[in-house]
Image (cartoon, rainbow, N blue to C red):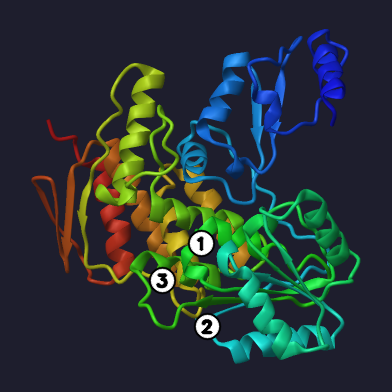
């Protein structure tokens, strides 16, 4: 927009003549005044810095803010998971949308050419991400020589003149270019339904969330799409790069953004809630301990007093597990274990049980024992019991010794539950 157009809009905004303003980062300037700012919607939240978000709060400390993102930054996600912010998820994909088939391998020119030819044969287009402006033209020249007249190739990056960049992206949009060799400039905002193959070289140099965002440039129609992530065959992958690439390869299903962000949170850390850092070092204390410490701090802040100590040392020899025949996916089994463990009263435990039956079918008998053990834990915590040790027919609860009548797990669990209910709290 021209300076005069911008000046008029800002003047109207300040006078209360504008109800909804759709804008870029430009409106974060201290020269922009608002008549009565009540709601801010930040789209693509991961592209905004903490300082920019704090600027919005300074305009109006009580303003409501809605953050939108397929991949929220670790700091924002941790705030949501910890209860500092509220979180809602939309994971239903568009009708007939297919998962993007993702392949990770050492760089292979033969495989690159084969992928391009396969896409051209079905009249599709290709994104080729080479995030190095200094060598991007060499890559384009090499592919041009190999493909000869069988593919039209264009190059796009941020150092091109604006008119030239507009012309290339417009040509690609209209199908006049088959292969767009570009930098991560296309990470967001590009919607080409006919582009259904994505090639990224040196993928190990990109962040996890960045890889997910770029992968979203393909698969935007009902056509099956493919993503090829290549890493250098001459240099060993670092542990962090390996974790990133393996994570993006594992999460190929639609609506994986939140899972990707959760993994990114584990790898990068959440950062400082009261500062400007957007990532930190959770691994220094472990994610579970970090979350517990944060939750306790929030409870102290909200209630003004320290939360009750709910530590229970529980050692049992019960054969309790989720059978693979019921849930054969490890990540789902871990999710269920965690969900049951977090059900700290009868109502939430029954809700969890009903949810499992609804999602996966009737529970095996052995899983009934898992819920019974959780009831025992919940009752023990209510009675301030600190330790339960079970071995065969003998159980010791704090200083109380008790002998079971039989050794079967289900009978022992029932007897233990009744015994825990009558044990006096230890002073």
Q: Which residue is mark 1?
A: 206
Q: Which mark is residue 242?
A: 3
Mark before the other along the chain sequence, 1 or 3: 1
Q: Nearer the viewer, mark 1 or mark 3?
A: 1
- Secondary structure at numbered mark 1: loop
Point out the tag, 2 or 1, that comes first from the N-terminus: 2
Tell me the SS state at disc 3: helix
Residue at 82%, 12% in the rendered image = 11
Disc 3 residue crowd, few under 14, some 14–19, many 20+, Cα 10 Å: few
Residue ID at (17%, 48%): 387
Crowd band around label 2 with a 10 angstrom C-alpha radius: few (<14), some (14–19), many (20+): some
Does 273 appear above or below 96? above
Q: Are marks 1 and 3 in contact (CB under 8 Å)?
A: no
Query: Is mark 2 in CB contact (under 8 Å) with mark 1?
Result: no
Q: Does residue 203 sit above or below 9 in this rendering?
A: below
Whole-angstrom CA distance, mark 1 to mark 3, is 11 Å
Q: Position of residue 32 (x, y in %)?
A: 71, 16
């Amino acid at each position: 927009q021209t300076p005069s157009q911008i000046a008029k809009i800002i003047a109207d905004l300040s006078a209360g003549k504008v109800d909804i303003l759709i804008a870029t980062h430009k409106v974060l300037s201290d020269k922009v005044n608002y008549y009565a700012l009540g709601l801010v919607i930040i789209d693509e939240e991961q592209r905004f810095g903490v300082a920019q978000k704090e600027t919005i709060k300074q305009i109006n400390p009580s303003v409501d803010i809605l953050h939108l993102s397929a991949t929220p930054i670790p700091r924002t996600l941790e705030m949501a998971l910890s209860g500092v912010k509220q979180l809602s998820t939309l994971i239903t994909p568009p009708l007939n949308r297919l998962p993007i088939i993702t392949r990770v391998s050492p760089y292979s020119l033969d495989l690159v050419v084969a992928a391009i030819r396969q896409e051209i044969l079905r009249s599709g287009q290709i994104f080729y991400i080479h995030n190095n402006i200094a060598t991007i033209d060499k890559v384009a020249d090499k592919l041009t020589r190999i493909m000869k007249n069988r593919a039209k190739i264009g190059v796009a990056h941020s150092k091109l003149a604006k008119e030239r960049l507009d012309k290339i992206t417009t040509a690609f949009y209209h199908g006049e270019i088959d292969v767009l060799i570009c930098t991560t400039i296309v990470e967001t905002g590009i919607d080409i339904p006919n582009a259904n193959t994505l090639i990224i070289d040196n993928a190990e140099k990109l962040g996890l969330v960045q890889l997910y965002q770029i992968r979203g440039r393909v698969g935007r129609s009902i056509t099956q799409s493919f993503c090829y992530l290549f890493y250098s065959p001459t240099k060993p992958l670092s542990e962090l790069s390996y974790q990133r690439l393996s994570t993006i390869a594992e999460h190929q299903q639609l609506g994986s953004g939140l899972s990707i962000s959760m993994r990114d949170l584990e790898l990068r850390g959440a950062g400082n809630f009261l500062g400007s850092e957007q990532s930190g070092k959770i691994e220094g204390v472990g994610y579970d301990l970090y979350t517990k410490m944060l939750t306790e701090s929030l409870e102290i802040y909200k209630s003004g007093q320290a939360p009750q100590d709910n530590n229970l040392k529980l050692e049992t020899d019960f054969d309790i597990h989720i059978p693979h025949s019921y849930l054969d996916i490890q990540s789902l089994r871990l999710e269920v274990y965690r969900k049951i463990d977090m059900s700290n009263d009868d109502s939430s435990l029954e809700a969890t049980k009903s949810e499992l039956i609804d999602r996966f079918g009737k529970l095996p008998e052995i899983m009934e024992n898992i819920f019974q053990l959780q009831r025992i834990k919940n009752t023990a915590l209510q009675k301030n019991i600190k330790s339960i040790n079970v071995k065969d027919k003998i159980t010791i609860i704090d200083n109380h010794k008790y002998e079971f009548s039989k050794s079967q797990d289900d009978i022992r669990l029932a007897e233990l539950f009744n015994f825990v209910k009558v044990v006096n709290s230890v002073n």
